[in-house]
Image: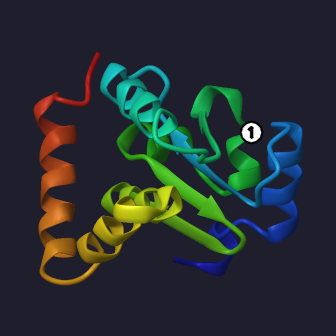
């Protein structure tokens, strides 16, 4: 990613402060997508992960565009932007315990490669729609 696309630590902290969340990272998802909302609810039922639907955020502060957030979920932290399946593995690690182990395993090859294909398939086939 080009350095101009990666949000500065200041922007992420400012945005998170606006959200009244005590974290320096946030999971951004498409709040218009029913599948995305159900996944966000699943995560929240298992732990505290800072997240927000994209419509509630100033995407410019995060270095994201509306097209990017409608195409994939994003994990944004100080100097880090992870889309799609990479964001999912990061969120699993945030949950801790067995989920953290699953997230680490899923981030390794060849599962990471497979995860990318599965994520794109779900998005493309409409499983991610309302």
Location of residue 19 in the rendering, given as x and y in whole percent from the top left corner = 81, 37
Q: Is residue 57 visible?
A: yes
- Classify residue 37 by image quadrant: top left
Label 1 crowd (10 A; few <14 / some 14-19 / many >=20): few
Q: Is residue 68 left or right of residue 130?
A: right
The image's colour scheme reads rainbow
Residue 93 in which image quadrant? bottom left
Count every numbered label the image shows and give the total. Answer: 1
Q: Which residue is mark 1?
A: 58
Taking 83 as reference, is 104 above or below it?
Answer: below
Q: Is residue 96 above or below residue 68?
A: below
Residue 89, visible in the rendered structure:
no
Indicate the position of residue 111 as horizontal and vertical percent values. 15, 73
Where is residue 23? Give x, y as percent: 76, 55
Figure quadrant of residue 42:
top left
At 74% from the left and 39% from the top, the residue drawn is 58
Task: Write the residue at 49% across / 55% down.
Answer: 95
Answer with left or right where residue 108 lies relative to residue 40.
left
- Residue occupying image coordinates x 57% and y 31%: 53
Q: Nearer the viewer, residue 125 or 25?
A: 25
Q: 113 or 42: which is nearer to us? A: 42
Reply above or below: 94 against 15.
below
80 horizontally vs 35: left or right: right
Residue occupying the far bottom of the picture: 109
Q: Is residue 78 left or right of residue 27?
A: right
Furthest-front residue in this view:
97
**Secondary structure beneath label 1:** loop
Quadrant housing the C terminus: top left
**Residue at 72%, 71% in the rendered image:** 78
Between 55 and 46, the one nearer to me in the picture: 46
């Amino acid at each position: 990613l080009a350095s101009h696309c990666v949000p500065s630590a200041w922007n992420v902290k400012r945005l998170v402060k606006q959200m009244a969340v005590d974290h320096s990272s946030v999971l951004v998802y498409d709040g218009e997508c029913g599948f995305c909302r159900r996944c966000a609810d699943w995560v929240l039922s298992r732990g505290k992960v800072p997240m927000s639907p994209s419509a509630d955020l100033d995407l410019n502060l995060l270095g994201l565009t509306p097209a990017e957030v409608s195409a994939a979920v994003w994990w944004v932290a100080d100097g880090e932007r992870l889309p799609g399946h990479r964001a999912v593995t990061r969120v699993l690690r945030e949950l801790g315990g067995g989920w953290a182990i699953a997230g680490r395993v899923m981030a390794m090859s060849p599962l990471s490669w497979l995860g990318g294909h599965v994520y794109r398939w779900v998005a493309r086939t409409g499983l991610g729609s309302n």
